[in-house]
Image (spheres, coloured by chain):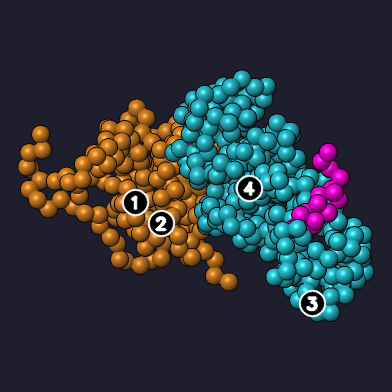
Chain colours: A orange, B cyan
Amino acid sequence: MHNKKNILIINGSLGGPTGNTSVLIKKIIELIDDKQFSVEIIHLTVELIDLEKRLKKADGFIFTSGTYWDSWGSPMQKFLEECTQFEASDILLFKPAAVIITMHSVGGKSVLSRLQGVLNTLGLVLPPMSGLVYSLSTHLALENYSVIDFHDDFWSIEDISVVVHNLITILKKESCFLSWPVDRKDPKRRWL
Amino acid sequence: MKNRQGSYKKLLFSPSSLAAHGEYLRLNLEELIKLKLTAFEFTTLYIILFLRLKHPKNWLQPKSKSETNNERLILDYIPHTFALSPWEKEKLAGLSTLDLFTSHNLKAIPLAINKTMIHWITGQWKIEMLEHIPSPRELLELQVKNTRCMTVTTNPKKIDKLVLESRDPLSFVLHDLMHAEQFFSQADSLRGQLGFYRLIKTIYDQPDLKNMLKNSPDFKKEFEYVTSDMNAYVIHLFKCLKSAIMRVDLDNNFFNQILIWWNMSEAEIHSSHQLNTPYFSSNDEVILKKFFEKNQEILS
């Protein structure tokens, strides 16, 4: 029998299973609804069970966290520290990882980039366009204005499908990556 | 088992979504079991456990001001493994288990559930929490005692699987609680139903009935549904039972036998024969309703 590939979502947000990030996780699960994949979630705020076993079982990862004082949640930091032992081991090496960060208004992009850097250094593979930040400010802007000139340049909840697609693509060893919309107009134009 | 299907939404969680939350559900179920809660408290936290995953943003919605009651405060016994977020702690602060159902709405949960939970904790309705799927006979035995049951999944290995391959564990519990509401809410018909169930119980071990149940799977299915899980006006129950019997008892012998087992008077037998015919009158209905009502032994 063909074994399903396993995607492990690791949620380092302080809000745990009912925080803002968990709402995006719900979206991710719906998007992965693919017979070839099974999904599991670890909320790092909750006691960890069989961490090594579950990391080993995973074929790919999605790391999620909120942004707290310019960094990821403390449960994620603790997790990364515990992962030191798995650096460049077959538990992590060459496995693809996507990252989704939430924030209020600032700091999230830096968290995303730094976390991707750490994960890559631990041995994980980062597919193209496999990380995004979703912010309260974007959420309010997109919800309250129907026509925004810069709409495509904001990461939106819909872009999560691109992140998921690219992770799944690399897990299937296919090469048909997607891109989220990019603003092709004059990037230097005034916005303030 | 057909009679556990019902019409309430079968899937609040897709199988893949249930599996994704498997470890979290297992961990918390084990914690709930360790806490040795009352059946009511266990059921409440069981519902919350799933509901938080279904609607992480807004599963708890205040409706009105809470009134003082003596129930335990939820935050006093909710396991730390639930990992409540700050907004949940804020909303649950000072709330008792009863408050949750009286002064709050649970997102997308029918009000019938709140009603059942309130009547359960206040001792007005008898609900038994089971950890297995009851047989139709077991359900009947409970209903004779004016009790409904509700099945929770307590096996951690099964908490992320569909029950009877059709409902997720949350939907299964909600379906049972809605059935309880249906059963207890119809005050006018409850007395007759109780009489009907008691009379069915008296004939369950009759060899003739056992043979029919054994020889006709279709009859068995209909009989078990009518006698244990239909919860309707007693005349409707009797109509369905007669109709099910008539399809396998072409010469009426078995139906007549039941009327004899039940010690029906001539008038009651006559009305039973009129049932499901154009000659069935409102007088026949009154006669049969009274017959079933006088055969219940629970309500004074």
Which residue, given by chain and number where applicable, does mark 1 sit on? Answer: A160
Give SS at disc 2. Answer: helix
Which residue, given by chain and number where applicable, does mark 3 sit on? Answer: B248
Residue A24 drawn at (x, y percent): 40, 45
Q: Nearer the viewer, residue A148 or B172?
A: B172
- Whole-angstrom CA distance, mark 3 to mark 1, is 59 Å
**Quarter of the image where the N terminus of chain B is located:** bottom right
Image point 36% across, 45% down: which residue? A100
Tell me, yes or no, whether the two marked residues, 1 and 2, touch with CB atoms within 8 Å: yes
Number of marks present in the image shown: 4
Residue B136 located left or right of residue A88: right
Which residue, given by chain and number where applicable, does mark 4 sit on? Answer: B178
**Quarter of the image where the C terminus of chain B is located:** top right
- Whole-angstrom CA distance, mark 4 to mark 3, is 32 Å
Residue B157 drawn at (x, y percent): 67, 52
Main secondary structure of the magenta stretch: helix
Residue A30, placed above or below residue B84:
below
Residue A68 drawn at (x, y percent): 37, 30
Please identify, in this view, whether the residue under mark 4 or under mark 2 is nearer the observer: 4
Pointers 3 and 1 within a single chain: no
Q: Chain of mark 2?
A: A
Please identify, in this view, whether the residue under mark 2 or under mark 3 is nearer the observer: 3
Residue B204 in view, yes or no: no
Image point 41% across, 65% down: which residue? A172
Residue A53, placed above or below residue A46:
below
Which residue, given by chain and number where applicable, does mark 2 sit on? Answer: A31
Magenta region: which residues?
A: B285-300
Give SS at disc 3. Answer: loop
Residue B178 located left or right of residue A125: right
Q: Magenta stretch: residue B299 in it? A: yes
Q: Tell me the kind of residue under disc 2.
A: Leu
